[in-house]
Amino acid sequence: MVIWDRLVRSWHWYLVAVVVANYWFLEGGDDLHNYAGYALFALMALRLSWGIWGRNPHALLVNFIPTPAAIREHFNDLRSGVIEHPAGHNPLGALFIYFVFLSIAYLSITGWLHEEVDALFGNDFLQNTHRWVSDVLMIGAGIHITGVLVMQKLTGTPLIKTMITGKR
């Protein structure tokens, strides 16, 4: 059964590569860092477009809205040991996706404002919050990886393989 289409899988791994490069290897303020930031913004625009108009039901944003009730139910399922394995994202995974969308949007906007708007160049608030949100995004990525490994173990669902092949 195909869960993630080629666009979603490619998007995921490009996002990983650009975020890792921008955080760990590219110097803030350098041209390559800025271009990577623009690439992240373009990736987000692509994924949001696919999430609205795409043909894959598992990738449509309306199909994984992390409501408080769904999150509560998921936690109850985890506590009881009876865990559903939805074809797409579970409520916590969905919450993480929205966290990533918001983080990348914030990083793109603050980076652009800081670098392209002369009056804001050197603005401590923009610099500090940009750095803080990038740190929080990295922490979130670590939590995401841990969550994927835990859910893969608890459910027996090959989540990592699915993000590579698209099939479950």
Image (cartoon, helix red, strand yellow):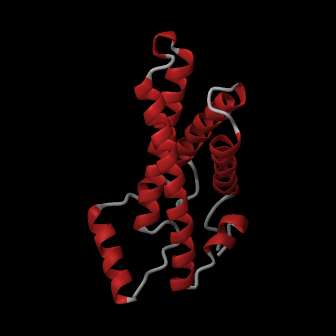
Q: How many marks?
A: 0
Image position, residue 61 (x, y; %): 46, 52
Q: Residue at x 51, y 22 (%)?
A: 114
Picture layout, residue 29 above or below residue 95: above
* Farthest residue, direction top: 119
Can I make out residue 63 in this image? no
Question: Closest to the observer: 114 or 49?
Answer: 114
| Relative height, residue 58 to residue 109 (above, below) | below
Q: Where residue 157 sits in the image (x, y, percent)?
A: 58, 80
Q: Residue 42 lies in what quarter of the image? A: top right
In the displayed structure image, the side of residue 6 where residue 42 appears, left or right? left
Quarter of the rendering containing residue 78 = bottom left
Can residue 93 be seen here? yes
**Residue 141 x %, y %:** 54, 57
Q: Is residue 130 above or below residue 52?
A: above
Q: Residue at x 49, y 56 (%)?
A: 140
Task: Left or right? Give the position of 130 relative to 69.
Answer: right
Examine the rendered structure and indicate whether residue 48 appears above or below residue 76: above
Task: Tell me the quadrant of the picture where the C terminus can be found.
Answer: bottom right
Depth check: give the residue in front, 22 or 63.
22
The residue shown at (64%, 74%) is: 1
Q: Quadrant of residue 152?
A: bottom right
Return the residue found at the far bottom. 81
In the image: residue 144, left or right of residue 4: left
